Image: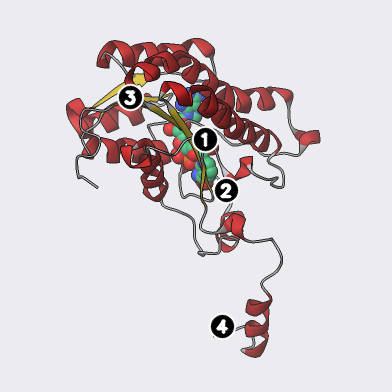
Amino acid sequence: MSKREFEGKRVLVTGAASGIGRSCVELLAARGARVLAVDLDKAGLDALSGEFGDAVESFVADLSEREPAEAMVSEAIERFRGLDILINCAGIGSFGRVTETDPAVWRQVHAIDLDAVFFACRKAMPHLVESKGNVVNVASISGLGGDYGFTAYNSAKAGVINLTRNMAVDFAREGVRVNAICPGYVLTALTAQMPPPIAEAFAAGVPIGRGAQPDEIAEAILFLASDRASFITGHVLVADGGCTAATGQPNGMEIMMQAQTGGEGA
Ligand SMILES: NC(=O)c1ccc[n+]([C@@H]2O[C@H](COP(=O)([O-])OP(=O)(O)OC[C@H]3O[C@@H](n4cnc5c(N)ncnc54)[C@H](O)[C@@H]3O)[C@@H](O)[C@H]2O)c1
């Protein structure tokens, strides 16, 4: 891989002020891309463009609404005279079973996590057809199966995954690739909101034994966005430390070892 793999590429990244999105911007800028970093968080964006100078420009937008989601694409086209890569990363979580999920929360989660992806892709696609570009949507393993109490998030992320597959087949002949990434537990502001016992339980549930750093996910996103992935479209790349490889059955080996050592470890 060339150190300047994204030289001359024009990229739009949403959710750019924090976590996985921020890490994407950092890696892209370091590898030669010009990036329009989009987020709700102006202070976070200012810090980012201060760090990278001309390579990173910022645009403040609340992606829970259609108009700003479309406006950010127009802004990228105007500033860069085209677009090569769209990374839809902005997202929020939610907690509550279907019976405890307020309809306003359901709507808000779908507006940001799913509708914004639709509006951004809808507006960007003609420009990506022109540049033979690609899209990477940040979904989640929560879009592949059910989690306890993640009603709205499970639904929205599943929508992102199948929207990705749909757009991949619809635009394959026009030269646009569309892929999704499904991270597992990642150490970002989103998961830092979890009370410590819950965070510990999430980490313990990952076969690798820890949450991912944001750049471990950003590297996988950049691979899908790069020319190295030129024959990959409609793919849903899981980056979860082995979480979905497990059946969910208990770790009998560990329980036996603990019993033999009196719970003091091996
Ligand atoms: N952290 C995890 O464990 C994890 C796991 C799987 C998937 N994801 C997904 O990764 C993506 C990035 O999450 P993260 O973990 O980096 O979280 P994060 O909170 O660090 O970053 C999310 C960013 O999205 C922005 N954002 C939220 N609402 C917005 C809105 N209405 N308009 C514009 N920007 C908005 C936030 O300001 C923030 O900068 C999300 O789509 C999330 O669902 C995260």
Graded by Cα atoms within 10 Å as few (under 14), some (14 to 19) or many (20 or more), the crowding at tag 3 reads many
Amino acid bearing label 4: Gly
Q: Are marks 4 and 2 in contact (CB under 8 Å)?
A: no
Q: Residue 135: x percent and y percent?
A: 43, 29
Q: Which residue is mark 2?
A: 194
Graded by Cα atoms within 10 Å as few (under 14), some (14 to 19) or many (20 or more), the crowding at tag 1 reads many
Q: Residue 34: x percent and y percent?
A: 24, 27
Residue drawn at (28%, 41%) of the image: 27
Q: In the drawing, what numbered circle is on residue 84?
A: 3
**First in sequence: mark 4 or mark 3?**
3
Q: CA distance from mark 4 to mark 1?
A: 43 Å
**Helix, strand or loop for disc 1:** loop
Q: Are marks 4 and 3 in contact (CB under 8 Å)?
A: no
Q: CA distance from mark 4 to mark 2?
A: 27 Å
Q: Quadrant of residue 166?
A: top right
Residue drawn at (60%, 59%) of the image: 245
Amino acid bearing label 1: Gly
Residue drawn at (54%, 49%) of the image: 184
Q: CA distance from mark 2 to mark 3?
A: 36 Å
**First in sequence: mark 2 or mark 3?**
3
Q: Is residue 256 left or right of residue 23?
A: right
Amino acid bearing label 2: Met
Q: CA distance from mark 2 to mark 1?
A: 32 Å
Above or below, 97 against 163 in this view is below
Q: Residue 254: x percent and y percent?
A: 63, 77
**First in sequence: mark 3 or mark 1?**
3
Q: Which residue is mark 1?
A: 234
Q: Which residue is mark 4?
A: 265
